[in-house]
Image (tube, rainbow, N blue to C red):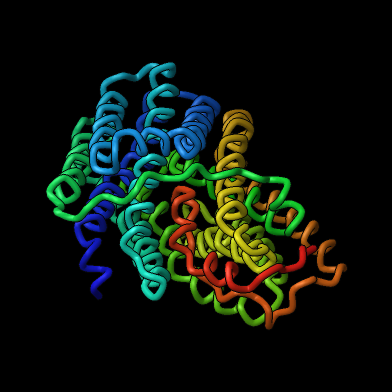
Amino acid sequence: MKALVAVTSLLLSTALLLIGQGMQLTLVPLRASDNGLSDFLIGVSASCYFLGFIVGCIGIPATIARAGHIRSFSVLTAVMISAVLCLEMLDGWPFLLGLRFLVGVAISGLYTVIESWLNSQASAESRGRILSIYTFILLASIALGQALINVGPVASATPFMLAAVFLALAIIPVGLTRRMAPAPLEPRRIRFNLLYQRSRTAFAGALLSGLVVGSFWSLGAVFARGNGASQSEVSWFISAAIVGGALLQYPIGLVSDRIDRRRVLLALCLGGAAASVAVALSTGHAWHLPTVFLFGAMVMPLYAISLATAADVAQSDEFVEIGTSVLLLNALGAVSAPLFLGQLMSLLGPPMLFWSFALLCLLFAAYVTRQLRDARAVSVVQQVPFTAASPDVAPASFELDPRGEEHAQAGERPADD
C-alpha cells in the first residue's frame, strides 16, 4: 500500500494519458477511412506508428536522461497533443504518415518515463503487484477510450478534441507531484539472436503477436467500418476484443504454469485461427461480438505467454535483454503486417484481414507442433510463475517484472527448443 501511495499521481496520469491514447488509436483509422484513404495507406500509416514506437524505445531514453522524467513527460505529452490535433485538421496522407510516426515516438517515450518511474518507487516485494495494477490500468483505460469516441461523429472535431483534453489532463498529476523523479535510465540492448537461441518458440510467438494483434489495432476498425458498422458499433467491436484478452489472460497464464507453455501457445493459435474464421463469417449476425471476444481471448495473451516462455529459459541477468527483444520483435511484426494486409483488404475486401489472421495462426501452430517433437530443456516444475504483460509498454517495464529478480538468483538456465 505504501508503494502504491507513492505512485498514485503517476498512475492517475497514466490512466488519463491512456484514455486519450485509446481514443486516438481507433479515431485515426476511422477518420482516414471516412476520408476515402485506401486500406493500404491506412496500413502504411499504422506501420509508421509502430516504427515510431520502435524509434522511441531506442532513442528517447537518452532524452529522458538529459531532461529528466517530469520535463520529458510534459514535452512528450505536448508533442502527442499537437499530433492528435493536427491529425484532426490535416487530411492528406503524407501528414497522416508523419503524424502517426510522431505519436508512436511520443507514446513509447511516455511509457518509458512511466515504467522507469514506477520501478524506482517499487520494492522487491511490491514490484509484481505494481506491474499487475499498471497492466490493468493500461487495458482498462484503452477500453474506456473506445467508449468515449462516441461523443461525436468521427467526421467532427469533438472526439479528437476530447482525446487531446485527456492527454493534457495527464500532465497535471505528474507536474504537481512532490515525489523525486528517478535516476537517469541506462540504455537497453536488443539481442534477437539471444532470444532465438534461448527459445525459438518464444521468438516466433512474439513475432506472431505483432503480426496479428498489431494488425488488429491498425486495421480492426477499418474492417468493422467496411462491413457496415456504425461508429458506436466499431467501438464495441474493438472493446470486445480488449475485454476478451484482459479477462482471459490471467486464467490462461495460470494454466501455462501447470503444463508445457508451448502446448498453451499451440492451443491459442488453433483457437485464434478458429475465432478469426468465426469473426470473418459472422459479420451482420447477432453472434458477431461474442466471436470478437473469443478472438481477443485467444490472440491478446500470445505476447504474455511468449514472454513467459522466454523467461523460463533466460539465464541470470538476461531477462531484461530478452524481454526487450520480445517487445521489439512484436513491434517489428506490427510494422510489417499492415503493409501487406492493408493491400489485401483493398484488393479483396475487409474479410481478408481475419482470413489472413487465421492463416498466420495456423502456420505458427504447425511450427509449434514441430517444436513439440523436441524435448524441452526446462521442466514444468522449473517454469517461472506467469506474470500478466502487455505489448503496449516500453523496455523499462521489464525492470518492474519480478521474474528478472528470480532469474538473477537462479543462476544459469539451459536453452529451450
Residue 187's spot in the image, x, y percent?
A: 50, 42
Q: Viewed as shown, does residue 252 lie left or right of 128?
A: right
Q: Nearer the viewer, residue 401 or 46?
A: 401
Write the residue at 58% across / 47% down. Answer: 330
Residue occupying the point 16% across, 51% down: 173
Q: Nearer the viewer, residue 91 or 21?
A: 21
Q: Quadrant of the N terminus?
A: bottom left
In the displayed orientation, state which residue is furthest to the right: 373
**Does residue 306 appear left or right of residue 368 in this picture?**
left
Which image quadrant for residue 69?
top left
Residue 227: x %, y % from top left: 47, 42
Q: Position of residue 14 (x, y in %)?
A: 28, 52
| Percent of width and height locating residue 353 | 59, 43
Quarter occupied by residue 342: top right
Q: Is residue 338 in view?
A: yes
Looking at the figure, which quarter contains the C terminus?
A: bottom right
Return the residue nearer the eye: 203 or 140: 203
- Seen in the image, is 248 located left or right of residue 79? right
> Along the horizontal axis of the image, is 240 left or right of 385?
left
Rendered position, 87 above or below 388 = above
Q: Name the residue at 35% across, 38% down.
A: 64
